[in-house]
Amino acid sequence: MRSEQQVEAALKSYEDVDSWKTIIFLYNAALKEVGTKLEILNDEFQHVHQYNPIEHIETSIENMVKYINDIAGVRLICSFTSDIYRLAEMIGNQSDLKVLSIKDYIKNPKESGYKSYHMLVSVPIFLSDSVVDTKVEIQIRTIAMDFWASLEHKIYYKFEGNAPEYISKDLQECAKMVSELDDKMLSLNEAIQECIAQQDKDQIRMNEELMNDVCRDVLGNNKEYKDSKVQEKVTEIVT
């Protein structure tokens, strides 16, 4: 309720501006704040792990009249399901973002087959004379999940939400195939990472063996050099 009250207060303070434009302004500001945070997290992950968990970021302002809570939306598209939960944890650790609710449609898909991870967060928007906590919904999904959701939206939009039963069943079957694809791609990625890690270990071992060989050669040559000098000295004394 605090967020709604702050939005109302902000609207009253903008008497010379159309209230609807003010709402759009606040939610656009919230999208910019959250978008910047996500880009920084992605850059940090690249810097530390040499890997980008976010394929791309989409922002939108939807359902303006009916669902104020969902008015500002950010969609994160990832390569693998493991990235989804990693990103959700990173977002939850942001000190100036408050996680209001979580809906995990990956572990608990909708009946239609829809899968995604939803986070409703509150972000402070600092205005010239006030701070307004504004809600933003963050949806995190894989490329495959996003592909399915986009097609499902287009199909149901054409039928105005009343698609024939056989189409709904086909969509559910496609959702299963998408889930299997995500699982397979995740397993494949993990196998690739293990292979790379093993190659790195093998390379380190080869480098160590090569260094040991060089050291033995150097030490051996030094010993032969010293022995030859000793032999020369003995020869000089004898003669």
Image (spheres, rainbow, N blue to C red):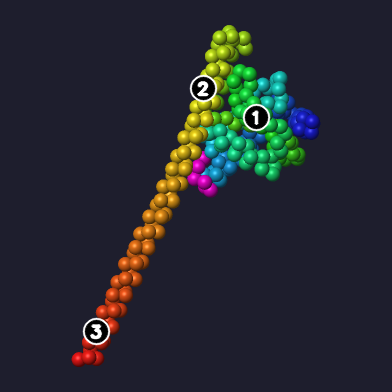
**Which residue is drawn at the image coordinates 63% and 29% (left, top)?**
107
x then y, percent, for residue 238:
22, 91
x then y, percent, for residue 191:
46, 38
Label 3 crowd (10 A; few <14 / some 14-19 / many >=20)? few
Quadrant where the C terminus sits is bottom left
Q: Residue furthest top?
A: 164
Question: In the image, is residue 39 above or below residue 75?
Answer: below
**Which residue is drawn at the image coordinates 59% and 9% (left, top)?**
165
Three-letter residue code for mark 1 = Asp
- Left or right? Give the position of 31 relative to 142: right
Three-letter residue code for mark 2 = Met
CA distance for labels 3 and 2 = 82 Å
Q: Earlier in the sequence, mark 2 or mark 1?
A: 1
Determine which of the numbered discs, if any, sits on residue 196 in the image.
none
Q: Nearer the viewer, residue 44 or 229?
A: 229
Membership of 32 in magenta stretch: no
Q: Residue furthest front?
A: 238
**Which residue is drawn at the image coordinates 58% and 43% (left, top)?**
40
Q: Which residue is mark 1?
A: 104
Magenta residues (range): 47-52
Q: Nearer the viewer, residue 135 or 218?
A: 218
x then y, percent, for residue 61:
63, 26
Element at badge 2?
Answer: helix
Q: Which residue is mark 3?
A: 232
Element at badge 3?
Answer: helix
Three-letter residue code for mark 3 = Glu
Q: Which residue is mark 2?
A: 177
Q: Earlier in the sequence, mark 1 or mark 3?
A: 1
Say whether residue 205 is visible. yes
Q: Are marks 3 and 2 in contact (CB under 8 Å)?
A: no
